[in-house]
Image: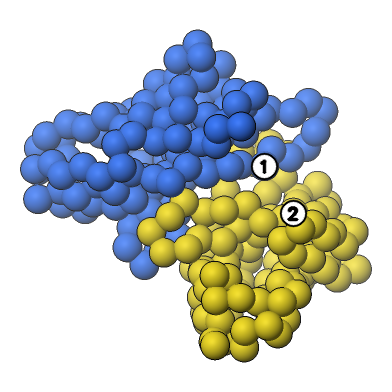
Amino acid sequence: DAGVTQSPTHLIKTRGQQVTLRCSPKSGHDTVSWYQQALGQGPQFIFQYYEEEERQRGNFPDRFSGHQFPNYSSELNVNALLLGDSALYLCASSLLGFPSPQETQYFGPGTRLLVL
Amino acid sequence: DAKTTQPTSMDCAEGRAANLPCNHSTISGNEYVYWYRQIHSQGPQYIIHGLKNNETNEMASLIITEDRKSSTLILPHATLRDTAVYYCIVNGSGTYKYIFGTGTRLKVLA
């Protein structure tokens, strides 16, 4: 059973460029969340996608956008990159359970982005 | 802001039980307690979760106090590979995002 996969594993970009990160959820999962983890800090929630729509968004600017495809995979796009966008970007998948009140999220290995 | 507080760091001797505490005094009735760990530069790994009863799986045990204001993750026989940052998270119905705190950096000593 494949877990959450992310690509690429590492990426180097320069300020002002745009980047697209990809995530495939765990088999059977339908919901994808994205997190940003700066060095030495805990992950911070960017947004979550379910049924190809953004369900909730954290405190991130519009430069951060996403997409979910019919096969539940997802992309995170960041425009106009800043030095401060350098971080580990984590994807997590879960299954929207009803009437289950909780959704356990399973994380991928992350994509490490360095902006120069 | 995170709804949990954890000690910044802890040491544990290899082979001994590691007991990691977490305070979540504002937890709501429908919120679960989740534990994850993150080994250097990897994605967080799910360990265990619970609502109000104690839980055990192949990785760890979770003890939740009766008033649910705190919990303890127990690794019964810590190994060097358990060295990681451990995060305690409170999450419930309608709250899709996980709010991570700074976690506890556990170092298992040989």
Rendered position, B88 above or below A55? below
User: In the picture, residue A31 is in which quadrant?
Assistant: top right
Q: Colour of chain B?
A: yellow
State the SS at label 2: strand
* Image point (71%, 77%), residue name: B77
Q: Are marks 1 and 2 on the same chain?
A: no
User: How was this image coloured?
Assistant: by chain
State the SS at label 1: loop
- Residue A7 in view here: yes
Residue carrying label 1: A104
Rendered position, A25 above or below B44? above
- Residue A53 in view here: no
Residue carrying label 2: B49
* Image point (11%, 34%), residue name: A17
Q: Colour of chain A?
A: blue
Image spot of residue A25 (x, y percent) = 52, 29
Q: Give the residue furthest to the top.
A: A70
Structural crowding at the residue carrying mark 2, measured as other residues with C-alpha within 10 Å and reported as few (<14), some (14–19) or many (≥20): many
User: In the picture, residue A61 is in which quadrant?
Assistant: top left
Decide if residue A63 is on the left or right side of residue B105.
Answer: left
* Image point (91%, 68%), residue name: B66
